[in-house]
Amino acid sequence: MTWFLTCLQDFAEFAISLDKENNVPPEKSLKLPYKIDGDKVGSHTIFLSFNKVENWTKALKYTLCNLKWVLYWFIGNTSFAPPSGSLCAAQSSKR
């Protein structure tokens, strides 16, 4: 999990540097809502051992929230589009 946080932080730093290169104003640049610092997201550690389940759950929730922000940034800054024959589209047409 720590490596995942490191990758997420590295991608966020890459996105911020890309925004700076493209002269995106700082208020519109990617900014993660929860700071990642080593094994901590916000102030909660991602490790389950020696941690309360509630705090561990918050760390996971904050990680997912940061991931959602990165995903929104990625979709907004690339030409990525889900495949037209995606599973969600196929399931919704059956209803």
Image (spheres, helix red, strand yellow):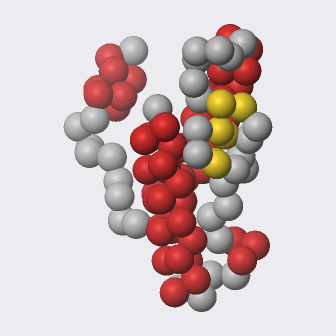
**As drawn, is 29 to the left or to the right of 43?**
left
Give how far across and how far down residue 94 sits, in percent: 32, 17
> In this view, which residue lies farthest toward the front?
50
- Using the rendered view, name the quadrant where residue 43 is placed: top right
* Residue for point 57% across, 71% down: 16
Residue 20 x, y percent position in the rendering: 58, 83
> Residue 57 placed where, x, y %?
66, 19
Give the mark count.
0
Q: Nearer the viewer, residue 3 or 78?
A: 3
Q: Is residue 68 visible?
A: no
Q: Residue at x 53, y 54 (%)?
A: 9
29 left or right, relative to 4: right
Give percent across and percent down for residue 36: 64, 48
Quadrant hosting residue 58: top right
Q: Is residue 95 visible?
A: yes
Quadrant (top left/top right/bottom left/bottom right) for the C terminus: top left
Residue that appears at 46% across and 32% down:
1
- Where is residue 85, by image quadrant? top left
| Residue closest to the eye, 37 or 60 | 37
* Residue found at the far top of this picture: 53
